[in-house]
Amino acid sequence: MLTAVDLDPLTVPAADGDGGSPEAVLSRVFGFPGFRGLQKRAIDRVMAGGDTLLLMPTGGGKSICYQLPALCRPGMGLVISPLIALMDDQVAAMRQLGIKAAALHSELEPDENARIRSELAGGRLDLLYVSPERLLSGSMLERLSRLEISVIAIDEAHCVSAWGHEFRPEYRALAQLPRHLPGVPRIALTATADPRTRTDILEALAMPDAELLVSSFHRPNLHIAARPKGLELNQLLELLGRHRDAASIVYCNSRNKTERIARSLRERDWPAIPFHAGLSPIEKRAGLLRFRSGEPIVICATIAFGMGIDRPDVRSVVHLDMPDSPEGYYQQIGRAGRDGLRSDTLLLYGADDMARARHWLEQSQAPPAQKRVMGQRLEAMIGLAESTGCRTRALLACFGEALDEDCGHCDTCRNPLAVFDGTVPAQKVLSAIYRTGQMFGALHIVSVLRGKQTEAVKRHRHDQLALYGIGREKPDGFWRSVIRQLVARGALRVVEGEYASLALQEQAARPILRGEERVMLHEEAAADLASELAASPSPRVASVLRPLDEGSDARFQALRAWRTTEARAQAVPPYLIFGDATLRDIAADRPRSLAALAGIKGVGASKLERYGDRVLQILADAPL
């Protein structure tokens, strides 16, 4: 397997602690005109030697916050990351920029491992990426203590918290780092952590004096949508059809389902592969290489998808099953649109998802306090799925953030849901379930309400009940929606067994049946998803996209074709050479000199030296 350390970086004066101010290095090495959001505040804190916990959404530029101090402070930057593929991608990206970076992990060949250790001992690295397991094993810490370390970055810091959605116990041992590397500033970074998790991270890492910096979690380029499950493959294809020539991720709740969905997509001529923990190392590596190659592909994965998603041009993320917390959900949809361009997310959910998640929680052996928090997060996720207001606002509220106005780019903003007094329909559903003995599933209950003469209705003589047919004026879908919403609000539960059945949750159902509690329900979305997604982007999203005229688009496609060829020659992902956003700017501005090309965002000194002449030639050869 080719990894990032196979690249030979160019030498660009910017490192070893004498490359100038962070602003100068940002411009010269990374090709960025200025800092975004909290980047400068975080960098200034680290440059001054202080500890920091930084929360910034995926694609928000977290990496810059430790890469710049590593280049501007004396010594080598140490980056602790949990995923091998992510480390390799980040190292490859650094070497494209002329930065001397390497990663130590378990998949290195012996000679490669020896070469990196020699570079490390000789002080010839600007950045070293290492997993927590490798850092804490053998004599690694003792070796590092003999070197000058500029900064310690703890990436994916939510892994340190028992309250986080990807808890890794070995991360807790990172609290000992100040003992081995005293006086080195630490910066812990994550894209997802609610207030409880943030507190736990600081305690677990022994960072009592760290400054907490929290960026907005709002991603205006993401269209967030949720739909009740229907024919899920058709619903999936409806969204994927917008992104035939792009990468997409489809999350499923089981290994078998990832394989079934991938197989169904392949039968319909989609390039789809499953990815889960049960695959062999060879299968995982092959899937990873295809994903990193930049080709259009659909990855059908479990939530344990451990590729280390660093590909910026994932255009859609679909959940075919409901996640168990807003944190996990946000982390996963955050893998779409990291380049800032319009991307779509879709959550499909049903009463069975809610019931199954609640059942698993009840069976959990976790301590009572932890189960209580897990329950709160699950109910927040259910509430998010059933939200009738701005879905983005509901999601951000889970992280303690309040938007001043509706986002304008989620499904409920594009296609507002009508809310109605559903007390009487709710009473009819609850009564039908009670009168039939709380022994039947939704299909049978709907048949009783609709007055259908099914075999089961006749056999159980439910057509003799006084309430038989009291809901015949409404279609099946209406009653299924009422049942699902009653499950969501806890008035009904799904009883697991050979056949799942519905039963009343007495404490929540009794006030409804007695008319003591009003039940407001929402209608199902009237517009189909394709129409909703095809609508013009909201003003916030439109500001992210740079329109290309015919000539600019031709140049953009020519640049993309060259990038693909160049990436294959180097065995690196295409997006590490130039991202789509940078290529769009180059195509639109059509610079005619290296100096003009250097003014494009994302074109630093190393990339200008590597690729500048070829890019200018492509632009010159392209039609006007």
Image (cartoon, rainbow, N blue to C red):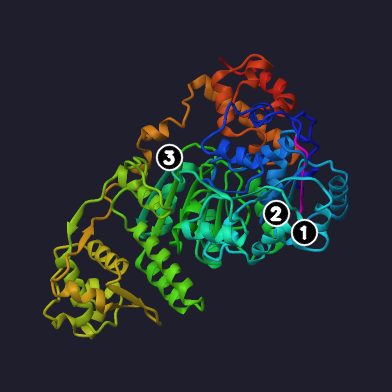
Q: What residue type is labelled 2?
A: Ile
Residue 392 x, y percent position in the rendering: 38, 48
| Residue beneath the point at 34% across and 40% down | 408
Q: Mark 2 points at which residue?
A: 84
- In the picture shown, does residue 128 fall above or below 374? above
Residue 321 x, y percent position in the rendering: 44, 62
- In the picture shown, does residue 160 fall above or below 58? below
**Residue toward you, 498 or 64:** 64
Q: Is residue 8 left or right of residue 595?
A: right
Indicate whether residue 100 is drawn in magenta.
yes
Q: Mark 3 points at which residue?
A: 220
Determine the CA span between mark 1 and mark 2: 8 Å
Q: What element carries label 3?
A: loop
Mark 1 or mark 2, which has the lower sequence index? 2
Q: Is mark 2 on a helix, strand or loop?
A: helix
* Dot 1 and dot 2 residues touching (CB under 8 Å): yes
| Residue beneath the point at 46% across and 38% down | 342
Q: Mark 1 points at which residue?
A: 106
- For the record, the magenta segment spans 99-104
